[in-house]
Image (cartoon, rainbow, N blue to C red):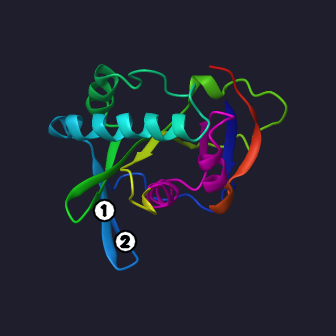
Amino acid sequence: MIKIEKPKTRRGDPEGTVLSGQKKGIIMEIRRSRKNDIDEIMKIFENARKFMKDNGNPNQWRDSYPEKSLIESDIENNVGFVCLDEGEIVGTFIYFEGKEPTYAEIYDGQWLNDEPYGVVHRVASKTGKGGVASFCLNWCFEKCRNLKIDTHRDNIPMHNLFIKLGFVRCGIIYL
């Protein structure tokens, strides 16, 4: 996994769960995932796995990852979020503030700082909906100005998004 970190500029308010914004005249919002969202979240992940395979990344999310039980756990732990466009779920991701055990060791590089950070995992959007992943990551950055995120070396679309949003490659982690 390639480790990426966004340079810190200031710390945001970690409490709010809803943020609205505009993308090409369409209002999107973020809220915590709910149990009745699970079927739609699973469809988004199914399409994301297909997209990754079709774009040279067949190994990152094999078969049925993430499993339904993991999504349920994310909801129970209040770390799962969805992005809505006019009430329709168009994206999903994990966000929390705290230590991520897999980030303890980094190879071929180093973190930008040792300060508290927000963690983002499993960003996925509905097929054909542009700007969703950017909106989700910018929402996370508003919550905590010191973000860490990782992706598979073959996930070129995500690498390009990270560069576009100003993230800096810090090194490699192993899961």
Neighbour tally class for label 2: few under 14, some 14-19, many 20 plus, Cα within 10 Å: few
x 83%, y 36%: residue: 109
Residue kind at label 1, given as amino acid type: Glu
| Of residues 143 and 45, the one drawn nearer to the viewer in this rendering | 45
In which image quadrant can residue 169 be found?
A: top right
Q: Is residue 124 left or right of residue 161?
A: left
Q: Is residue 150 magenta?
A: yes
User: Which mark is on residue 29?
Assistant: 1
In which image quadrant can residue 96 be found?
A: top left
User: Which mark is on residue 14?
Assistant: none
Q: Which residue is mark 2?
A: 21
Label 1: which secondary element: strand
Q: Is residue 70 visible?
A: yes
Q: Is residue 47 left or right of residue 133?
A: left
Q: Is residue 34 left or right of residue 1?
A: left
Rendered view: 86 above or below 47: below
Magenta portion: prevailing SS class? helix
What residue span does the magenta drawing correspond to? Answer: 133-162
In which image quadrant can residue 130 be found?
A: bottom left
- Across and down, in percent, residue 110 comes to 80, 37
- Across and down, in percent, residue 83 comes to 33, 54
| Of residues 148 and 143, the one drawn nearer to the viewer in this rendering | 148
**Viewport quadrant of the C terminus:** top right
x 55%, y 58%: residue: 11
| Of residues 138 and 114, the one drawn nearer to the viewer in this rendering | 138
Residue kind at label 2, given as amino acid type: Gly
Q: Are marks 2 and 1 in contact (CB under 8 Å)?
A: yes
Q: Is residue 96 visible?
A: no
x 36%, y 52%: residue: 15
Residue extending farthest to the right is 108
Q: Is residue 96 magenta?
A: no
Neighbour tally class for label 1: few under 14, some 14-19, many 20 plus, Cα within 10 Å: many
